[in-house]
Amino acid sequence: MGKRPYVALAFAVFFTCATHSALAQAVPAATEVRSPWAIGAGISGFNPDYGHGHLLGGTLWIDYTFTRVPSFLQGLSMELEARDLNYDRNAPGVSALRQDTAGGGLVYSWRHFVKLRPYAKLLAEYGNADYGLYVDRKGVLVPSKPGHDSRNFLGAGGGVEYLVTPRLWVRADYEYQSWPDFFKYTTPAGRLTPQGITVGAMYHFGSPRIH
């Protein structure tokens, strides 16, 4: 699917951050992070901006929280994200469609509240889309041969996390994507703008907040 360079990059970033974590000095108890790593998963519902109203699938997150930063940057983390939207895509009368994406970027969480964390994110991603083309013949949409396209794109969004146990946070996440130069039949021309919501949970290896 053309993702090998991105997978290699993700692993390189992973081990770089792991080394940074091993060498980092302790931070004050009020903001200490025993382990900077967290992993999570969720169920996604997206409007793919092509074909029909929505796609369903799964999302995986891996987060690394930066611990040696100035106080005004506490709450900054790096996130790797992978999503596969491959369900509810073959409804009668609409195009077959699948979108899978992978990428990473920065997330900033506002840590003013004890159990509630709003956050914003900006990601650089790579996506694949499989779709069935439809040709308008005298007012009738006729299925044509299936297509495939891949793009680098940007994703932005945010959400909120809520603490349910010392290590487990539930998450509601919104993401907006901009796929450039897709193909000429999109509106606006050449661009897809998928967007959707993911509901899931994040498990932190070590309490993410020390009280």
Image (tube, helix red, strand yellow):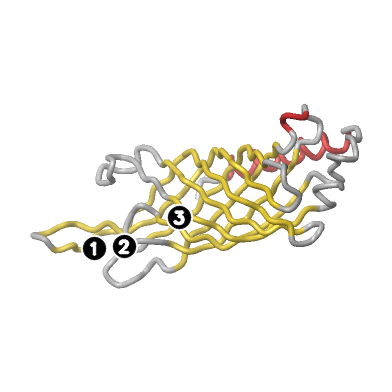
Name the residue type under label 3. Answer: Gln
Q: Secondary structure at mark 3?
A: strand
The image quarter containing residue 68 is: top right
Question: Could you say where residue 140 lies in the image, as x and y percent from the top left?
Answer: 14, 63
Q: CA distance from mark 2 to mark 1?
A: 8 Å
Observer-nearest residue: 168 or 149? 168
Residue occupying image coordinates x 64% and y 45%: 80
Name the residue rendered at 69%, 56% in the picture.
Answer: 162
Q: Amino acid at mark 1?
A: Pro
Circle nearer the viewer, 1 or 3: 3
Which quarter of the figure has residue 111? top right
Chain-order first, disc 1 or disc 3: 3
Is residue 148 rendered to the left or right of residue 7?
left
Q: In x, y percent, where is residue 166? A: 82, 57
| Mark 2 or 1, nearer chain start | 2
**Vertical placement of residue 207 versus 199, above or below:** above
Q: Is residue 181 above or below residue 70?
A: below
Disc marking residue 143:
1
Compare residues 199 and 149 and report the one nearer the observer.
199
x and y, in percent, of residue 69 in the image:
77, 29
Residue holding disc 2? 95
Residue underneath mark 3: 99
Which residue type carries mark 2?
A: Ser
